[in-house]
Image: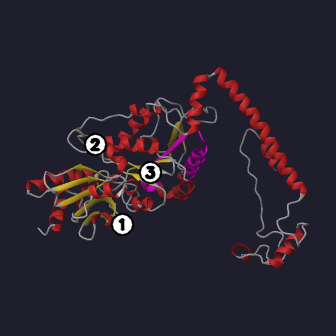
């Protein structure tokens, strides 16, 4: 069957193998007992007898098996030698391309690649972080030829198409855009395969809600400590009219709960650029980049904390002139909201600190001194705001703080209306902050 499949070169082949659990075990073949329990010493002897082994010997490998596998090793050594010789000839003929290949395989990034990261001018003209991500991705593609990926039939919506490059197809292996189709699980598995193959940096995109269909390959990537970059857009009730089935609620905390994952939810275009920088520098686990559908202001880095603070997981975006009475914490689209709330609190004589916290995982890697700088232990009045499940935020707000978040599913309505209905307003943030202070 395998030979016939290999001989067929014009279409896929399917080999259907009918199996019997515990084949060779006379008393347990085709039973559930063989699945969850050891066969037992007596039954193992019967199995050995069935296959022609000495039932009294353990870990016996027949000579013909040893000979077969040693021959495979010898064949592999010959093939490796031939390939290395071929590559040496290639290097002599194409020194620049071979150097590019060797750099990619090494896992290192080319010198000066960070210079390609866009810097966005502060503006009240709004830009969704998915749009900013698209600009960053295309800028990086110019200096990272091994950065490849695509989307699960949502490239235009997720802004993940590399505009100046072809698609990867059966007739064009030189393309860099992959069309995975509506197959999130398969996309995740393909990304894992590419991440395991030295020489490429793979990314894949879909809406955050559809990360549910990718859970097994995401978990395997975390276990294997490989780095596919997972781009998830339309990250909250800000999705709007598509309603509850498409509005993520529990997905952020669900992904954060997977060990060895780094999730980053940036607040604006410049945080998005640094989120991509962190993702490319990280190599020991999946990186999840979470972006908005709706537009966000581009924050003024000349007056506020620098977006490079993304690498720390949390940083002071805006502080008060005197000791803050309350700390306002948010990720993503809600950072803009707490910035407005800070200004209103100041009008009422209340000092506050705004902390942008795009990544819990990156923050937890910081030392105690840095954590104390961001969240002083003597300031326990803290309010976290995130348009997702409130689970997990309690650790950062303390027992004297509060959380504005989602405790149920969304609704079908324009995003602006939904944010009002679920309490993501300046007035509600101010109200909750004042309540913490007993006002």
* Of the image marks 3 and 1, the number of the one nearer the N terminus: 3
* Of the image marks 3 and 2, the number of the one nearer the N terminus: 3
204 is higher (above) or lower (below) than 325: above
User: Is 76 left or right of 204, judged from the image as shown?
Assistant: right
Q: Nearer the viewer, residue 434 or 417?
A: 434
* Quadrant into which the C terminus falls: bottom left
Disc 1 versus disc 2: distance between alpha carbons? 28 Å
Q: Nearer the viewer, residue 143 or 208?
A: 143
Q: Are marks 3 and 2 in contact (CB under 8 Å)?
A: no
Give the residue drawn at x 37%, y 40%: 273
Give the residue drawn at x 16%, y 52%: 320
Residue linked to disc 2? 306
Residue 426 visible, this angle:
yes
- Magenta residues? 185-210
Residue linked to disc 1? 391
Q: Which mark is residue 288?
A: 3
């Amino acid at each position: 069957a395998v030979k016939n499949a290999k001989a067929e070169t014009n279409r896929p082949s399917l080999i259907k193998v009918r199996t019997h659990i515990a084949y060779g075990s006379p008393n347990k073949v085709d039973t559930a007992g063989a699945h969850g329990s050891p066969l037992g010493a007596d039954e193992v002897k019967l199995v050995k007898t069935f296959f022609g082994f000495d039932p009294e010997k353990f870990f016996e490998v027949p000579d013909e098996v040893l000979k077969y596998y040693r021959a495979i090793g010898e064949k592999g050594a010959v093939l490796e030698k031939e390939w290395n010789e071929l590559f040496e000839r290639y290097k002599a003929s194409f020194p620049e391309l071979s150097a590019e290949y060797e750099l990619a395989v090494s896992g290192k990034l080319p010198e000066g690649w960070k210079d390609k990261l866009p810097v966005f001018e502060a503006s009240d003209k709004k830009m969704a972080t998915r749009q900013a991500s698209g600009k960053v991705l295309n800028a990086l593609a110019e200096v990272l030829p091994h950065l490849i990926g695509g989307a699960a039939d949502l490239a235009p919506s997720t802004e993940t198409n590399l505009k100046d490059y072809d698609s990867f197809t059966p007739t064009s292996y030189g393309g860099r855009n992959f069309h995975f189709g509506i197959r999130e699980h398969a996309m995740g598995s393909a990304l894992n395969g590419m991440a395991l193959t030295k020489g490429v940096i793979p990314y894949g995109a879909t809406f955050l809600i559809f990360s549910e269909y990718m859970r097994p390959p995401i978990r395997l990537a975390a276990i294997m400590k490989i780095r596919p970059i997972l781009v998830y857009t339309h990250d909250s009730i800000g999705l709007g009219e598509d309603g509850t089935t498409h509005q993520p609620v529990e997905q952020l905390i669900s992904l954060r709960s997977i060990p060895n994952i780094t999730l980053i939810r940036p607040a604006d275009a410049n945080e998005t650029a640094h989120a991509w920088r962190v993702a490319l520098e990280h190599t020991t686990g999946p990186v999840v980049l979470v972006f908005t559908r709706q537009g966000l202001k581009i924050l003024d880095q000349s007056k506020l904390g620098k977006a490079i603070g993304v690498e720390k997981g949390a940083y002071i975006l805006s502080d008060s002139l005197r000791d803050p009475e309350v700390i306002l914490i948010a990720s993503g689209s809600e950072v803009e909201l707490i910035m407005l709330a800070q200004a209103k609190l100041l009008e009422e004589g209340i000092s506050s600190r705004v902390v942008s916290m795009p990544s819990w995982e990156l923050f937890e890697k910081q030392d105690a001194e840095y954590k104390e700088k961001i969240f002083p232990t003597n300031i326990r009045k803290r309010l976290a705001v995130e348009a997702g499940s409130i689970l997990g935020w309690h650790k950062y707000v303390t027992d004297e703080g509060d959380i504005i978040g989602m405790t149920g599913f969304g609704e079908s309505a324009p995003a602006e209306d939904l944010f009002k209905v679920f309490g993501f307003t300046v007035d509600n943030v101010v109200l909750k902050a004042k309540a913490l202070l007993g006002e």
